[in-house]
């Protein structure tokens, strides 16, 4: 039963690299080595791969900056929506208080008029 596997590169001279795989089967670890020989000089390989790596890192940084900008915009819009809801609630409450005061004033005028008419 394979439970865990880790692989890493081990340098062996100028033209060969070995992959070392550590496999845990149950509780017993097993090491497997596999040597790979390159036809080109490692410096040439590095010179070919390094620009691709840098381009990949630049792309990752640009994607992260776009993602963080979008997250900031979403957070700002959420805050604006919450503030608008609070403002709507406060204005609605203020309007209802003013309307209720006007209704109460009209009722008081009607009662005062009725009591004056009965006297």
Image: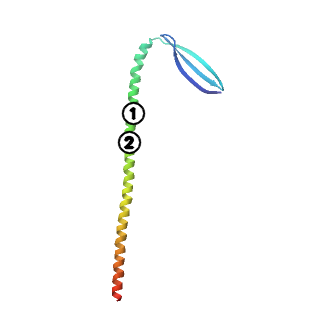
Circle 2: element type: helix
Whether 6 is drawn above or below 108: the answer is: above
Does residue 73 lie above or below 6 as drawn?
below
- Tally the numbered discs: 2
Residue 4 percent across, percent down from the top left:
60, 27
Characterize the local packing of mark 2: few (<14), some (14-19) or many (20 or more) Cα atoms within 10 angstroms: few
| Scheme by which the image is coloured | rainbow
Position of the N terminus, as image quadrant, is: top right
Q: x and y percent of residue 63 in the render? A: 39, 33
| Vertical position of residue 50 compared to residue 71: above or below | above
Residue at the location (44% across, 11% down)?
41
Position of 30 relative to 76 (above/below): above
Indicate the position of residue 66 as horizontal and vertical percent values: 37, 36
Q: Nearer the viewer, mark 2 or mark 1?
A: 2
Q: Which residue is mark 2?
A: 72
- Residue at x 42% of width, y 16% of height: 46
Label 1 residue SS: helix
Name which quarter of the figure residue 91 lies in: bottom left
Instruction: Assess disc 1: are there few (<14), some (14-19) or many (≥20) residues with their C-alpha within 10 Å of its C-alpha.
Output: few
- For the point 41% across and 23% down, the residue is 53
Q: Residue at x 40, y 22 (%)?
A: 52
Q: Earlier in the sequence, mark 2 or mark 1?
A: 1
Which quadrant, please, contains the C terminus? bottom left
- For residue 47, the mark is none
Labelled disc at residue 63: 1
Tell whether 13 sits left or right of 96. right
- Residue sticking out furthest to the bottom: 119
Q: Residue 23: where, in percent of width, then height? A: 61, 23
CB under 8 Å between discs 2 and 1: no
Rounded to the nearest angstrom, the CA distance separating label 2 from label 1 is: 14 Å
């Amino acid at each position: 039963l394979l439970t865990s596997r880790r692989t890493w590169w081990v340098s062996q001279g100028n033209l060969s690299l070995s992959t070392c795989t550590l496999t845990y089967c149950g509780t017993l670890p097993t090491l497997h080595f596999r040597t790979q020989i390159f036809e080109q000089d490692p410096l040439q390989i590095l010179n070919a791969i390094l620009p691709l790596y840098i381009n990949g890192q630049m792309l990752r940084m640009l994607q992260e900056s776009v993602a963080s900008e979008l997250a900031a915009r979403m957070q700002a819009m959420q805050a604006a929506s919450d503030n608008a809801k609070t403002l709507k609630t406060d204005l609605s409450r203020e309007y209802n208080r003013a309307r209720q005061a006007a209704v109460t004033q009209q009722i008081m005028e009607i009662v005062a008029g009725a009591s004056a008419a009965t006297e």
